[in-house]
Amino acid sequence: METLGRILVVEDEGHLADGLRFNLEAEGYDVDCVETGETALERLAPGSAPDAYNAVILDIMLPGIDGFEVARRLRANACYVPILMLTARGRSQDMVEGFAAGADDYLPKPFELAILFARLSSLLRRARVWRAGQAAPASPLPVATSVAPEVFEFNGRRIDFGNLELAWQGTTLRLTLMEAQLLRHLLLRRGNVVSRKEILEQVWGVHEDTDTRAIDNFIVRLRRQIEDEPSQPKHLLTVRGVGYRFDP
Ligand code: CA
């Protein structure tokens, strides 16, 4: 039977894991639950079953290695499965660390199921669109319907959007899907001011009220990769009170 996708839930609290499984299955997903980060890494080990999962819902607080470490190791193993990280409410540091570890999106606990489903389906949709090598989903912004180049060079960097790679000074970094999506969007809108709301809606596909600080943290992370001096950006500029402007 066709399902919406196969999800790996990494959560040690039994009642939360059971609730997630029940509701995700009712929504139409295939679900596997594991209780530790170590087990999650085994399930997602390189070569074990490529693309076994369409997404991972990853709790931070786990009995052995924590969710941050799981995300870091997955990305270090070149596993780029979309990761939705569950963070504790009011701990913005978790969000910062989660994105730095390679998470694609985050959701503070406790969360509403409707929000979880919205985040998950937008994460899966973006991953599908990405794999299909198409442009961003249909958008009301005319500029976003133009096609971004697959490879873009600026400031000594070479960004390969197809392979999610950023090459610089002989080293190649992997980008997460979200990082590449945001870079591509900023590139399409280069020279224009892009608001945080636009980024939320066009890049993240999120239309609910969401804490826009997550975007700022993402920008900080991107600057470390594309700016020579991230604390004094010359290309990815903050437009105070509005958003950002990309000037390659
Ligand atoms: Ca937990």
Image (tube, rainbow, N blue to C red):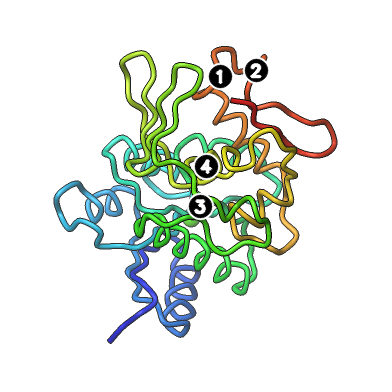
Residue at horizontal 44 percent and vertical 47 percent from the top: 177
What x and y, as percent, mark residue 158? 40, 26
Determine which residue is flagged by label 2.
234
What x and y, as percent, mark residue 49? 17, 58
Q: Which mark is residue 85?
A: 3
Determine which residue is flagged by label 4.
184
Q: As drawn, which residue projects farthest toward the right? A: 241
Determine which residue is flagged by label 1.
227
Residue at horizontal 60 percent and vertical 39 percent from the top: 186
What kind of residue is marked 3? Met
Q: Which one is earlier in the sequence, the residue at label 2 or at label 4?
A: 4
Q: Quadrant of the N terminus?
A: bottom left
**What distance separates the C-alpha of mark 3 from that of mark 4?**
23 Å
Foreground: disc 4 or disc 1: 4
What kind of residue is marked 1? Glu
**What distance separates the C-alpha of mark 4 from that of mark 1?**
16 Å
Q: Which one is earlier in the sequence, the residue at label 2 or at label 3?
A: 3
Residue at horizontal 56 percent and vertical 63 percent from the top: 119
Decide: is 53 above or below 244.
Answer: below
Q: Is 240 left or right of 208, judged from the image as shown? A: right
Discs 1, 2 touching: Cβ within 8 Å: yes
Disc 3, SS: strand
